[in-house]
Image (cartoon, rainbow, N blue to C red):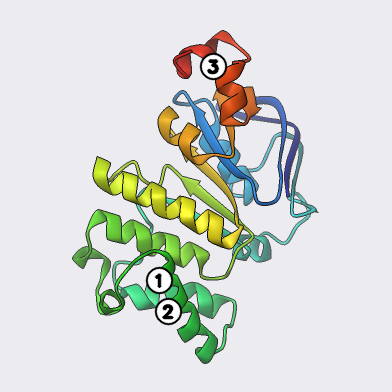
Amino acid sequence: MIKFTNVSKTYEGRQILCDISFEIKQNDFATIIGSSGSGKTTILKMINGLIKADSGTIFVEGENIDTADLIKLRRRIGYVIQSTGLFPHMSVRDNILYVCKLIKMSPKDMQRRIDSLMETVSLERELLSRYPRELSGGQQQRVGIARALAAKPQILLMDEPFAAVDELTRKSLQDETRLIYEKTNTTIVFVTHDIKEAMSLGSRVMIVNSCTIEQFDTPEEIRRAPATDFVQRLTGG
């Protein structure tokens, strides 16, 4: 599904990723956790071609990123960011339908998709006519998730999506995301700065530090056998 082989990246003379290799399989829920500047968001952005590697190869759904049609690829990948990225001048309905129109979904299918998505992210239909400024932070993030899922992507990228909401809302959004994963079988790659979130959500957890991958394994295996001192300290072992 997603495969990095000997991938490196440097910014302004600073090594961000150092010859990393890993594979995320179909239907994995991979969380990425690490120190600030360790390269976790860079990894996420490389998956949909927003950042190009200096060396190495990246395959997504069997396609080499270097030769793939990135516009078509990105339409098959949902993307959720911390600030939601909603269009402020568009209603909730139009924000979600924006993606449906991009892929030329029929009006009948768009209506069905809207109904399904609002149920999936636990939002009331009366919110469809509202604008982002009229929603709470948690509601905005749910709309962002709904929009990312609109085209039924095989891959959903989530970049610290719950960092800006309060603890209660965060827990609710975590539960919703887990349910979405279980219902849709979407492959999720989820960047977070919270080790508890990473370990509770991920079927596999990637721990990055100083431009390298310290460990990429199931939460159970990481707790049982941390691969490095850094992993042990991070997980409280």
Return the x and y of residue 10 as percentages of the image width and height: 61, 28
Q: Which residue is mark 1?
A: 119
Q: Secondary structure at mark 1?
A: helix
Disc 2 + disc 1, Cβ < 8 Å = yes
Return the x and y of residue 132 as percentages of the image width and height: 27, 66
Classify 219 as above or below 162: above
Return the x and y of residue 181 as percentages of the image width and height: 54, 54
Q: Secondary structure at mark 2?
A: helix
Q: Amino acid at mark 2?
A: Asp
Q: Which residue is mark 2?
A: 115
Q: Secondary structure at mark 3?
A: helix
**Residue 205 location, quadrant:** top right
Residue found 52% across the figure and 80% down from its top: 101
Q: Which numbered dot is residue 231? A: 3
Q: Amino acid at mark 1?
A: Glu
- N-term mark: 3 or 1: 1
Residues under labels 3 and 1: Cα distance?
38 Å
Residues under labels 2 and 1: Cα distance?
6 Å
Classify 213 as above or below 165: above
Disc 3 + disc 2, Cβ < 8 Å = no
Viewed as shown, does residue 194 lie left or right of 237?
left
Residue found 49% across the figure and 32% down from its top: 199
Residue found 55% across the figure and 76% down from its top: 102
Q: Amino acid at mark 3?
A: Val
In front of the other: label 3 or label 1?
A: 1
Q: Nearer the viewer, residue 8 or 25?
A: 25
